Amino acid sequence: MKSFNLSRSLLSMLGAVVVAASALAAHAETLTMASTTSTEQSGLFSHLLPAFKQASGIDVKVVAVGTGQAIDMAKRGDADVLFVHDTAAEEKFVAEGFAARRFPVMYNDFVLVGPKGDPAGVMGRDIVAALKKIAASNAPFVSRGDKSGTDAAERRLWSQTGIGEAGQPLANDRKGTGYKECGCGMGPALNIAASSAAYVLADRGTWLSFKNRADLAVLVEGDKRLFNQYGVMVVSPTRFPNLNSAGAQKFVDWVISPVGQSTIAAYKIGGEQLFFPNATP
């Protein structure tokens, strides 16, 4: 009987522990982040966010979409923090009162990827000259066409080619008959390029983590116009009082701190660093 009572007591204690643990998990602090696909598809967040949780106890739920969609999501108050890579759009987001401040956090670069045989003859360091050759040769080119930061960068680069009407957005039909928009993320765009021997502008982080390369290779890199800056912002608590702004501020403070910055720098694939921290002290 004593043994039975002891077992029953132990089971009761175990049950209480399970209930307490479940209650604690249910009340764990969470944070919603709207971010670009490159930060997730490159594997950075799988490396970065566990370190933040260990430091803060906060779980981060990431919604990875194109930068334009991420900004729209934040403008609706559907995200606590915004982590994207389109400086002009980010500054506009702040100017419109959706965030008090934008913090630079890290950078890498874009690369022009294409078939190793390079049928359009674009290989080199001049991205604008490369796009002109792609248009002139009607070479296959996959554009994301999804309002992402990469899409915005690509459109800026096309506008510098001078092959359209002055002062007007460059029409797609001026980019060659091989130009196609997929309306998709970076990973799917690279998959399409790999299967169709097409050119595509990619962020280096996603390219380095991309496995299905087929005959693709980096053909244009090193042009200063390919610089790719990322920024992070706490979505305005004034506009959206119900957001977890305190948690969002903790994330921003951490990711621009020496610890957060060194965690970003430590993320590598095959010994190659994908992102370079540059937060303002």
Image (spheres, rainbow, N blue to C red):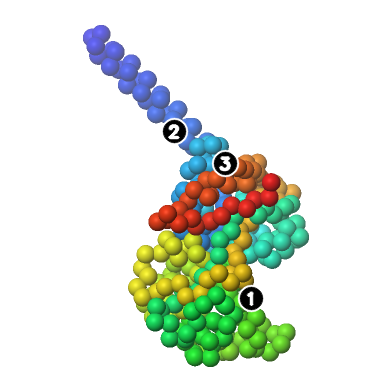
What is the secondary structure assignment of the residue under circle 3?
helix
Between the residue at mark 2 and the residue at mark 3, the CA separation in whole angstroms equals 31 Å
What is the secondary structure assignment of the residue under circle 1?
helix
Q: Label 1, on which residue?
A: 156
The crowding category of the residue bearing disc 3, from other C-alpha atoms within 10 Å (few below 14, some 14 to 19, many at least 20), is: some
Q: Residue at x 43, y 86 (%)?
A: 119
Q: Label 3, on which residue?
A: 259
- Which amino acid type corresponds to the residue marked 3 in the rendered image? Val
Q: Quadrant of the N terminus?
A: top left
- Which amino acid type corresponds to the residue marked 1 in the rendered image? Arg
- Give residue 202's position: percent from left, percent from top: 50, 69
Between the residue at mark 1 and the residue at mark 3, the CA separation in whole angstroms equals 34 Å
**Relative to 115, is 244 on the left or the right?**
right
Q: Residue at x 57, y 83 (%)?
A: 129
- Give residue 99's position: percent from left, percent from top: 71, 54
Q: Label 2, on which residue?
A: 22
Q: Residue furthest front?
A: 124
Q: Residue 195: in sight, yes or no?
A: yes
| Residue in front for this viewpoint, 245 or 250 | 250
Q: Which mark is residue 188?
A: none
Q: Is residue 105 above or below residue 152?
A: above
Q: Quadrant of residue 13?
A: top left
